[in-house]
Amino acid sequence: MKISTDEVTKIAHLARLEIDVSQKEKMAEQLSHILQYIDKLKDVDVEGVKLFSGAAFMNNVLRDDELKVSPGPDVTLANAPQRDEDFYIVPRIVK
């Protein structure tokens, strides 16, 4: 599958990345090679391979919940781009 520079531009926009014109051509070529390699998986013979779910047979590896005191809005909102008292201000996404 061939990736165009227009598609790289669109992907970069969705990922919020800035890419130079020279990088777009190189990125399109690299992404095309990756997709060609992945496309080879269609040719793999999986006859007789048993299906399974998950990468490993593991039990629950999550940590136990611990009750902790909240650090408060001054700490949690310290790096917020915009805030209104104790709340984050985010761009409106629904019109």
Image (tube, rainbow, N blue to C red):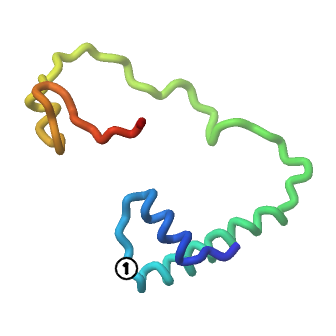
Number of labelled discs?
1
Residue kind at label 1, given as amino acid type: Asp
The percent position of residue 25, horizontal first and vertical second, equals: 50, 83
The percent position of residue 49, horizontal first and vertical second, equals: 85, 47
Q: Quadrant of residue 77?
A: top left
Front in this rendered view, residue 51 or 6: 6
Most distant residue in the front direction: 95
Most distant residue in the right direction: 47
The percent position of residue 30, horizontal first and vertical second, equals: 55, 77
Front in this rendered view, residue 38 or 92: 92
Q: Quadrant of the C terminus?
A: top left
Residue at 13%, 30% in the rendered image = 84
The percent position of residue 18, horizontal first and vertical second, equals: 35, 69
> Disc 1 on helix, strand or loop?
loop
Q: Quadrant of residue 78?
A: top left
In the visual, does 84 lie left or right of 89?
left
Residue at 59%, 77% in the rendered image = 4
Front in this rendered view, residue 90 or 65: 90
Front in this rendered view, residue 42 or 5: 5
Residue at 81%, 62% in the rendered image = 42
Q: Which residue is mark 1?
A: 20
